[in-house]
């Protein structure tokens, strides 16, 4: 590895130490359905978001709830203390499309219709409110 690459890699690692996030990859749900859930909790306080996700009827809400609990745990481990109510907020939640399985469905007159089984990646960042205002 060259010097320039090593320096930028070390800078990236240092920046990661102050970020608190978790990733959920290859979720077998379409990104469109997952974005509906992500939009419900974007910018919310984390414990309020957990309540919203727990009582949501969407199937994707259970996955996002588990991811949010993981992100809170990551924050607690890096800061070596417990999260308090009103302290942590969801700063960024992004849903990106992942691989797509392509299948064929038989159709009339010898044709075949394409089925696309979509999946997605979810990335969730949390941080304290006073850090966001600086």
Image (spheres, grey):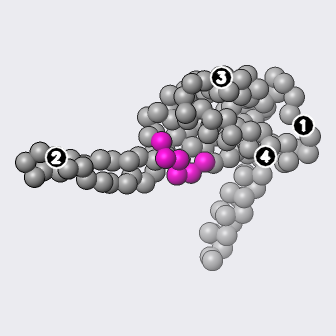
Q: Secondary structure at mark 2?
A: loop
Residue 71 spot, x, y in % from top left: 73, 42
Residue 104 is marked as none
Q: Which residue is mark 1?
A: 82
* Nearer to us: label 2 or label 4: 2
Q: CA distance from mark 1 to mark 3?
A: 24 Å
Residue at figure coordinates x 48%, y 42% from the top left: 29
Q: Which residue is mark 4?
A: 74
Residue at figure coordinates x 91%, y 45% from the top left: 80
* In this rendering, position of residue 28 left or right of residue 12: left
* Nearer to us: label 2 or label 3: 2
Q: Which quadrant of the view contains residue 122?
A: top right
- Mark 1 or mark 3: whose residue is earlier in sequence: 3
Residue 5 spot, x, y in % from top left: 62, 69
Observer able to see residue 53: yes
Q: CA distance from mark 2 to mark 1?
A: 57 Å
Q: Is residue 103 above or below residue 60?
A: below
Q: Which residue is mark 3?
A: 55
Q: CA distance from mark 2 to mark 4?
A: 49 Å
Residues rendered magenta in the picture: 24-29
């Amino acid at each position: 590895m060259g010097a320039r690459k090593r320096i930028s890699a070390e800078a990236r690692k240092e920046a990661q130490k102050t970020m608190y996030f978790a990733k959920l990859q290859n979720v077998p749900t379409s990104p469109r359905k997952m974005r509906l859930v992500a939009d419900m909790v974007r910018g919310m306080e984390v414990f309020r978001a957990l309540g919203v996700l727990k009582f949501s009827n969407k199937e994707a809400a259970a996955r996002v709830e588990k991811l949010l609990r993981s992100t809170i745990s990551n924050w607690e481990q890096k800061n070596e203390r417990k999260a308090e109510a009103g302290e942590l907020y969801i700063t960024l939640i992004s849903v990106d499309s992942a691989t797509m399985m392509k299948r064929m469905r038989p159709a009339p007159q010898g044709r075949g219709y394409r089925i696309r089984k979509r999946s997605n990646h979810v990335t969730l960042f949390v941080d304290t409110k006073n850090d966001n205002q600086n």
